[in-house]
Amino acid sequence: MPSKVMHRKLNIVCEPTPLAASGRLSELLGVELFIKRDDLAGPTLGGNKARQLEYYFGAALSEGADTILITGAVQSNFARLAVAVARAQGMHPIVQLEDRVPGKSDLYRESGNVFLSRLMDAEIMTYPLGEDEAGADGALQERADALKVEGRRPYVIHLSEGHPPLGALGYVDAAKETLDQKDDFDVFVVASGSGSTHAGLLAGLRGAGSGARVIGSCVRRSAAQQGPRVFRTMKLLARLYPGAASVADADIRVWDGALTPGYGQLGPPGIDAIKTMAIYEGLMLDPVYTAKSFAAVLALVESGEITRGSRVCYVHTGGLAALFAYEDVIASCS
């Protein structure tokens, strides 16, 4: 029997999100491909972070919070979704944008998720470094402490390691939801960034008795760095969801073949993935996460790591608002 998740959640996702069979891509690749449409999760132009926010906002509401603080890259889908949920709950949203991607245009800095956050009148802070999670969290905590002095009740959604990975519980739920739709998958492929979605999905599958492989496509760090990060997240998750304790070290699989040239930047595998999904399925991929995760499907089928005839679940984690911030980059590659 799967272990139960015992934490308050705010219902944000209209469950279940569709599990769509892709006939044309299945024929192209020689596998039985299904797309878990978590790009449809949550508010307008949602995505996988809506599942994570169910538990963070559940905790925030339990504490009587009136303000939400979150940090992320300039085109963070997580931050924009947090703003949307905060507004729906009558809470004040504060977003801190980190400078993670060098040399980007004004389009990148003002369009997409930034435009939507401003439209929802989010308070926006900036942080000059892109690879300093603890520092970014520290800056948010300073703002939260100042708010407390003013009589406000802030809740910080942390980015750095060491904090309880409440968001991963959203993908423990998603694993069971997907298995209820189809329970005989051989392989799941998903983007692996903070590690919470990857860890939660894997833990949820093992807790539900599924032995399907989960392959995380690295979007921010090399495989050598990302594998240990997911492992550490899994250990913390086991304190929240006992089913995570059944995950073996060998279960944590990562692939970084589309990571270059780095976080938030597109290389040839990502461009090819965007075009292939658009042409064969009429679906869009975002440049930061899903272009790199679907690139993993294409490459791993070609290499034989995903064998022909396999039943594959590709988790479309969404983030489509960011696509508009990369219009100039994508157009130049067409």
Image (tube, rainbow, N blue to C red):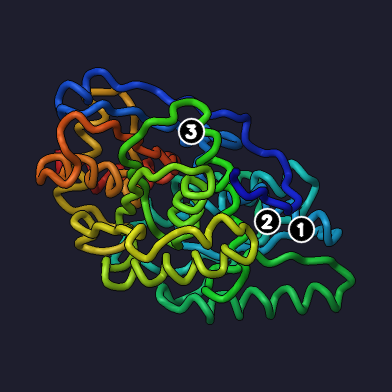
Q: Amino acid at mark 1?
A: Ala
**Cβ–Cβ under 8 Å for marks 2 and 1:** yes
Indicate left or right for 63 with 15 as reference. Answer: right
Residue 121: x %, y % from top left: 67, 50
Q: Which residue is mark 1?
A: 60
Looking at the image, which residue is at 66% across and 61% down?
94
Q: Which residue is mark 2?
A: 56
Separation of residues labelled 2 and 1 (CA atoms): 6 Å
Observer able to see residue 53: yes
Separation of residues labelled 2 and 3 (CA atoms): 24 Å
| Between marks 1 and 3 in the image, the one whose residue lies nearer the viewer | 3
Looking at the image, which residue is at 22% across and 44% down?
295
- Judging depth in this view, the residue of 296 and 98 nearest the camera is 296
Quarter of the image with the C terminus is top left
Looking at the image, which residue is at 76% across and 78% down?
145
Q: Which residue is mark 3?
A: 179
- Secondary structure, mark 1, is helix
Q: Quadrant of residue 310?
A: top left
- Outermost left residue: 303
Separation of residues labelled 1 and 3 (CA atoms): 29 Å
Give the mark nearest the N terminus, 2 or 3. Answer: 2
